[in-house]
């Protein structure tokens, strides 16, 4: 009964327009007061959260991705990939997915990936006759790769909440990330070949390919430096974010000379505003998490699930439905922060690996990014393409099914996520 009352109060606050961070904080404070606990637990919980070294990676990755966005790196990246695969059946769609995957490996941000590649790819694909809804869905879904392919901000937050190795989580995200890219490419080729009428792109000459590749090379090198440095142990994810920020400045400001002082200021302001919003949500979620822990709600839910859900498949189905429903109300980071302490104990009781469970959660969170009414990628693509939100949402449906298929495949074959971290 307590859980139902808390959820009703939380949804009521959200429905009247109270921001997620303040809704969580207010519910948490109220629970502490009504339960007879000291209100000083709230600031203590917030302070214990904000001094986490790993959280420094969040603003640095956001700043890096915004600098790359303002510096026009997405345009060069898309041009280079298109030069190699643009003449394939559905080649521009394939180039879009590959570009999203590469940029995701640089930025760690879904919104930045969708905005960067969407700005470049959408006009070109539509001008070539690709179905508009297909284009919108492709870009919105391609952007979700930013929170699965490492480095990933939601995986950083999951590692922070669970105290699991962020590097192991990054390694675990590689297999499912590449699997999603493959599924998106296969669907895009089949759709373009049999369901659409478009103007093919002529094959680029070898000189054009190498020229485009050379211009995009610094961005690929940046991705290699970040990922290679993290996985080799040369630096931590936070240090990788700082190095990536410095290299992004060199690429856009010195090598490409596409970053002006005005664009740099815009990138800093946007990164700062996003960082503040994320940290406020983390603070509010920490207070809420402290309160529900004192009320033993995670343990009660875990016991309830253990009593009523007796198989691993049953638990995963329950988790999937809960996360999909939560995605109708919460954005990605809020879901990770709120649901991880609630669902992970039940998953651990069923002997699920916490690294595997984190990847599964992130895939379901990806689904939330492209489901209305609060799917952020839908609004990003709507803004970039000046289209109707309904058209964008309908365009994502096939890709949403593919993401659910990947979640099912991950359940059937856990080594898709666990093979690399276990071997390394």
Image (cartoon, grey):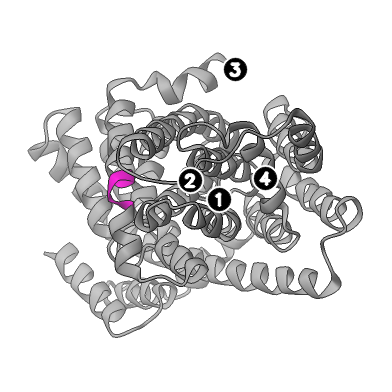
Percent across and percent down for residue 147 are 50, 47
Q: Look at 76% across and 47% down and name the residue there.
A: 244
Q: Which residue is mark 2?
A: 199
Residue 261: x %, y % from top left: 85, 72
Mark with earlier residue (2, 3):
2
The disc, 1 or 4, on the residue closer to the chain's N-terminal end is 4
Tell me the crowding category of disc 3: few under 14, some 14 to 19, or many 20 or more residues within 10 angstroms, Cα based: few
Q: Tell me the magenta residue range.
A: 396-400
398 sits to left or right of 420:
left
Magenta region's main secondary structure?
A: helix
Q: How many C-alpha atoms fall within 10 Å of the one at disc 4: few (<14), some, or many (≥20)?
A: many
Question: Do tag 4 and tag 2 residues touch (Cβ < 8 Å)?
Answer: no
Q: List the residue tagged with mark 4.
A: 79
User: What is the distance, in whole Å, between disc 3 and disc 4 at their CAs?
Assistant: 35 Å
Residue on which disc 3 sits: 424
Pick the front one: 364 or 4: 364
Which label belongs to residue 153?
A: 1
> Which quadrant holds residue 409?
top left
Q: CA distance from mark 4 to mark 2?
A: 17 Å
Q: Is residue 260 above or below residue 258?
A: below
User: Residue sitting at 31 percent across and 60 percent down?
Assistant: 393
Residue for point 51% across, 57% down: 127
Where is residue 107 shown, x and y percent of the image? Answer: 64, 49
- The reply to whether the C-beta atoms of the residues labelled 1 and 4 are less than 8 Å apart is no
Is label 2 in contact with label 3 (beta carbons under 8 Å)?
no
Q: Image height check: is 417 above or below 314?
A: above
Q: Is residue 373 visible?
A: no
Q: Can you tell which mark lies on residue 364?
A: none
Q: Quadrant of the C terminus?
A: top right
Q: Nearer the viewer, mark 3 or mark 4?
A: 4
Closest to the camera, between mark 1 and mark 2, is 2
């Amino acid at each position: 009964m307590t859980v139902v009352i808390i959820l009703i109060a939380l949804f009521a606050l959200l429905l009247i327009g109270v921001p997620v961070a303040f809704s969580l904080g207010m519910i948490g404070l109220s629970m502490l007061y009504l339960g007879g606990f000291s209100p000083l637990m709230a600031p203590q919980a917030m302070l214990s959260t904000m001094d986490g070294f790993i959280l420094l990676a969040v603003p640095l990755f956001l700043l890096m991705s915004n600098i790359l966005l303002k510096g026009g790196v997405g345009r060069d990246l898309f041009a280079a990939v298109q030069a190699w695969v643009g003449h394939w059946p559905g080649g521009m769609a394939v180039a879009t997915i590959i570009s999203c995957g590469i940029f995701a490996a640089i930025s760690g941000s879904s919104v930045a990936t969708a905005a960067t590649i969407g700005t470049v790819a959408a006009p070109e694909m539509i001008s070539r006759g690709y179905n508009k809804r297909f284009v919108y869905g492709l870009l919105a879904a391609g952007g979700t790769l930013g929170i699965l392919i490492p480095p990933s901000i939601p995986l950083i937050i999951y590692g922070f909440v669970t105290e699991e190795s962020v590097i192991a989580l990054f390694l675990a995200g590689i297999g499912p990330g590449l699997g999603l890219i493959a599924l998106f490419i296969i669907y895009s080729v089949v759709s373009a070949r049999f369901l659409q009428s478009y103007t093919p792109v002529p094959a680029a000459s070898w000189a054009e390919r190498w020229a485009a590749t050379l211009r995009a090379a610094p961005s690929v090198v940046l991705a290699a430096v970040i990922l290679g440095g993290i996985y080799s142990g040369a630096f931590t994810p936070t240090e990788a974010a700082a190095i990536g920020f410095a290299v992004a400045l060199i690429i856009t400001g010195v090598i490409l000379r596409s970053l002006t002082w005005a664009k740099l200021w815009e990138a800093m302001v946007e990164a700062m505003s996003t960082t503040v919003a994320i940290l406020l949500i983390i603070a509010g979620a920490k207070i809420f998490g402290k309160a529900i822990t004192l009320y033993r709600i995670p343990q009660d839910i875990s016991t309830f699930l253990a009593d009523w859900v007796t198989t691993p498949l049953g638990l995963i189905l329950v988790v999937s439905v809960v996360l999909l429903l939560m995605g109708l109300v919460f954005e990605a980071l809020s879901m990770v922060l709120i649901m991880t302490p609630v669902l992970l104990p039940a998953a651990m009781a069923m002997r699920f690996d916490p690294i595997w469970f984190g990847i599964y959660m992130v895939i379901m969170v990806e689904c939330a990014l492209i489901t209305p009414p609060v799917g952020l990628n839908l609004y990003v693509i709507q803004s970039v393409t000046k289209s109707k939100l309904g058209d964008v949402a309908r365009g994502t449906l096939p890709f949403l099914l593919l993401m659910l298929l990947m979640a099912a495949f991950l359940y059937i074959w856990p080594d898709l996520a666990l093979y690399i971290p276990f071997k390394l």
